[in-house]
Amino acid sequence: MDYKEQLLSVYPSCKANVGHNRVTIVQIYDTVRNNAELKRRTEAYRQALEAKVAGKVLKAMKAENFPMLVPAVLFKGGRNTESIESWTCFCQADFDNIDPELLDEARRRIRELKFVVMYHVSMGGRGLHVYYVFQIPNCGMNEKVYEQAFRQGNELISNAIPADYDTAVETPTHGSSLCHDPEAWFNTDLEPLKVDMSCDVKKRRKGSSIVNSEAVTQDKWPARWTAERVFAMAQGMVDRSSRGEFAQGNRNNYLVALACLLSDYGMNEETAAQLMNTEYSGQYGEEPIPSLVRGCYKTVAVMHGKKALPDSQRGGDRSKEVKMELSADFIRRQCLRFDVISRKIVKLDGTELTDRDINSMLLACSVEMGQNISLQVFRAALMSDCVPEFNPLTEYLKGPANSLPKEVNDGESIIDKVADMVHVTNSPLVNISDTSQASQTSPHSNQSPSTLWHTCFRKWFVSMVASWMFPEVVNHQMLVLIGKQGIFKSTWLDALIPPELVRYRCRQSATDFSDKDEQLRCTEFGLVNFDEFDRLSGRDLDNLKSLITTPDVNVRAPYGTTKERRIRIASYCASGNKLQFLTDQTGNRRFLPFFVESIDSPFETPIPHRAMYDEAVRLIEGGGFEYWFTLDEIERMSGYVEQFADHTPEEELIDVYFDVPRSDPENPETRTVIFLTPSEILAKLTTWGNIKKPISVRQLNTLMDKKGFTRVRRGAKSQRGYLVVELETTTINSNRIVSTAQNVF
């Protein structure tokens, strides 16, 4: 609804609790400026005030003769919390006892606040009643939202004037009396206040003040408040204000706001001009900065020195708040950044802050600020938004592109060149059924091992980069290099990460993939490299497969206070020596294993990281490259991956003693087909193979389904089992014979 059409609750007097009217802010503005009866009552009240009439009489006049506006809510029935019908998105700020000499300047400053819709003077003529509009955040409207709308809006207005607002007005059912003001102001170009629910503004302490009763100039500041420190604090305040940051198109507004704020704090004009000129002269060319400062100081001269410095605000015990503000001010000047990946504070060179660094900073802060600041307060400020966030992985990807290495021609793929460093071949398992093709193609694939390697590596690597760029992307495949020791398998995988990001690479060995540390590891590292991968047990591989597909984790970090949802960014790779290391009977499509014959040393042949990652980013942003595996590709890869599977004795014996019945009508089954329950099959296999620790019936069902046997029900008892052909001894022995003789024809 348009704010001009929003109905507000107006009671005939401050004593009334029922019988209110609903009018618009436009009607209220017209009444305040032009209503003759309201003008008469206002003049009578002020005459009584000047005549020093008894306080009880004045209080009765105010309560009985003046209408009261309750801007925050509409009521249904009485004027209490239980009778609230709806919220209006209007709020109020009451300022009493403003110095008459400062009233005009206070009005001017309020008019610059775009979220203020109207103001008028108070009945005594020495205060202002301000009304503003706020925007409901995405979380919806409730009492907590109104609380923050009141505090954030009142703090902005209070700091702009500067003057202290009435904290008692925070109750949504509170009203303000309306009086005549021919100079009341109405904003026709309103921009509602955006309430930031992530910023929990606390209620101001009773008796605290942000304004000095008398002007306090620079020569009267406490010794710890140097001009440089006040200047840095003022910069931060303007950055966080509605004026915005010092940027193209906003530089003049920013400098004007900064100069006015320095004047309010009582800084000398010459000092302010010198500091601002040193900081901004190279970026601001509209007019000389000293001239701009001179004009601002002249405009706000009546407010010079009226704004209190944080630790000189009177009233209440604010020592902890002051120390927090001093710590935050000190930290903002330290050029630190919060690493969103490692969740640690780092310096500009990327090194993490140690406990020694933090203690040294705390000591320097306490000495510089002249306060005994506790480690708890300092750490709280250090882990706040005083330190800006950055993502090292995405920053690296946005870095300047380098020219192609000399050994790479235009149009060639850098990723393929890096893949060429790894020389893959067929596994040592010889397919004796077709030895003529064994050296050219991979088993169960019509591609050579080298071609398959290049395809898989390109997809896996680009998917890794995409998972760094986009939170919704998860790399579901794990690259595995199998080969003899000492051929740079793990070293080459580690070398895929550039030196600038080596902090986000992890070398890992056997671990419990279900524990919290492993879950956190997938959110803190861009690449996790498992060494001696073939040592993992079947249960570990099952847990790892689950972790590979996890998009995020919800855990509490060590020494943390709450659980956090963290995005999984890690891609996984591994190396090992054992050829057949996959033990999952349900499938191994998450793994991309390759048998490696040799690898070019990454020390003698450095990887061109910059060009390699630039190519991956281009492939991702171009949109034409599929860095994920389609269902057809996964199906084809499953046959290739099978050669790396470690079969159980039961799985091998099924192929020896049983066969799947033929179902082709053109080639009908002539052998005897029998029905066997899973328990019968398992008993036969255990006896024939002399197996000491047989697999479970459930695992056997998985194997039978995998090999294509048909599961059926039979009989009145609905026995479940499989239709199988139990091979005869002669057939079994025949299948075992391998002829090595040369054919005559």
Image (cartoon, rainbow, N blue to C red):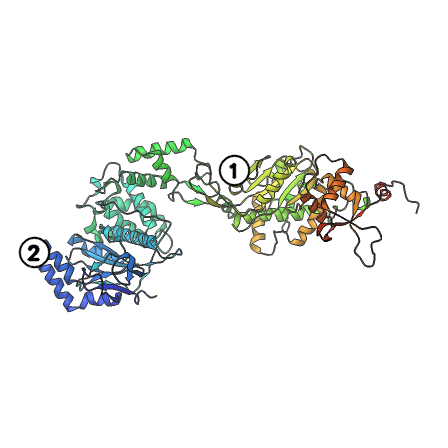
- Name the side, left or right, on which 438 lies relative to 149: right
Name the residue nearer the viewer: 293 or 559: 559
In this view, the residue in front, 602 or 338, is: 338
Q: Position of residue 612 (x, y in %)?
A: 59, 46
In the foreground, 722 or 299: 722
Q: Which residue is mark 1?
A: 517
Which numbered circle lies on residue 353?
Answer: none
Q: Number of marks in the image?
A: 2
The x and y percentages for residue 620 are 57, 52
Left or right: residue 413 versus residue 502 is: right
In terms of sequence position, does the residue under pointer 1 or pointer 2 come before the other? 2
Binning the other alpha carbons within 10 Å of mark 2 as few (below 14), some (14 to 19) or many (20 upward) gives few
Q: Is residue 167 left or right of residue 388?
A: left
Q: Secondary structure at mark 1?
A: helix
**The quarter of the displayed image where residue 195 is located:** bottom left
Residue 556 visible here: yes
Residue 603 higher or lower than 302, as above or below: above
Residue type pointed to by label 2:
Val
Marks 1 and 2, how far apart at CA:
74 Å
What residue appears at the point 79 percent right and 45 percent down from the top-left corner?
658
29 with respect to 639 (left or right):
left
User: Which of the labelled discs sits on residue 53, or is there none?
Assistant: 2
- In the orientation shown, which residue stands out farthest toward the front? 716
